[in-house]
Amino acid sequence: MKKFNYKQAGKEIGWNFSKMNYSVEHKSNFDYYREVVSNITSNTIMLDIGCGSAEKAIRFYSFAKRVYLTDVEYEMLKKAKTNVDKYYADMPLLKKKFIIKTLDCNSTFNFPDNYFDIVVSRHCGANMQEVHRVLKKGGVYISEDISNDDCQELKDIFNRGQNYGEDPAYKKEMIDCADAGFSEIKLIRFDEIEYYKTTNDLKYLLNYTPILNGFDDEKDNELLDDYVNKFRTQKGIKLNRRLYAFVLKK
């Protein structure tokens, strides 16, 4: 079976899925970016862990005082810099707010103690001891990640996939957060439904994400057709997304 390659996917598209034709139906009131933005002020210094190509960070975080965009992959940071330069080409003061640095989310962070007002991480995770260390007293960590039962119906047909059959990751993360010393820990589980207009739109997602731990256009087509035939609706091909978020306070 072909294994999913993060570096290759990042190099090719930089986690930019704007080419896909799909819609999202939110099943709860939680929205990651809305939660992050609600905690930003003009004095906020924030750290974005695993920023990817940073399209949304560039738009949503611009009224913070300073934003560190970090990722472990060089190609991601290259795309992030290109996007910052392009988006703020005529706004040099806003452009200066974004600082791009290499960071391994699981290692020691090269930042001083008590430095950030907000640390955020989406579909990346983080070293919770380090997150707690670099946050100011009263600072907030906000994350979003994929549950083990995400796209369960798709994984059941393929009998494989990201974290398929494993215990929920948020259980261990809850322990890690408590061990790190956070004073407030809030876990939010929520669902979304994505509707893909065509099979090719869904294939694009599966080719450039680890949902199936490596999608093979030749070997997996028959099983994908089974899924599409079963879950095609008037809105599009239905994909059930199951996510979770942490909102922590130091």
Image: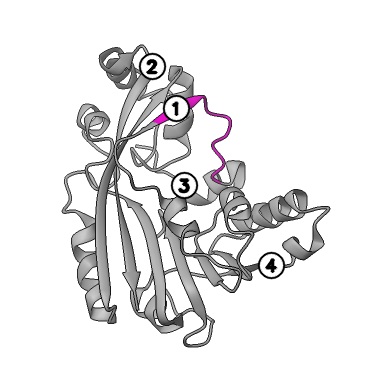
Q: Nearer the viewer, mark 3 or mark 1?
A: 1
Badge 1, how many Cα within 10 Å: few under 14, some, many 20+? some
Residue at image mark 4: 97
Q: CA distance from mark 3 to mark 2?
A: 31 Å
Q: CA distance from mark 3 to mark 1?
A: 26 Å
Residue at 45% x, 51% y: name it: 34
Q: Quadrant of residue 160?
A: top left
In the rendered structure, find residue 235 and report the number of the disc placed on it. Answer: 2
Query: For the residue marked with disc 1, what is the amino acid?
Result: Ser
In the rendered structure, find residue 23 and report the number of the disc placed on it. Answer: 1
Q: Nearer the viewer, residue 80 or 188?
A: 188
Q: Is residue 19 magenta?
A: yes
Q: Which residues are magenta?
A: 15-24
Numbered disc 2: secondary structure: loop
| Looking at the image, residue 210 lies above or below residue 70 | above
Q: Quadrant of the C terminus?
A: bottom left
Q: Is residue 119 magenta?
A: no
Residue at image mark 3: 5
Residue at 60% x, 42% y: name it: 12
Q: Nearer the viewer, residue 183 or 74?
A: 183
Query: For the residue marked with disc 3, what is the amino acid?
Result: Asn
In the rendered structure, find residue 96 and report the number of the disc placed on it. Answer: none
Residue at 39% x, 17% y: name it: 236
| Looking at the image, residue 219 lies above or below residue 159 | above
Q: Position of residue 76 (x, y in %)?
A: 60, 55
Q: Nearer the viewer, mark 3 or mark 2?
A: 2
Numbered disc 3: secondary structure: loop
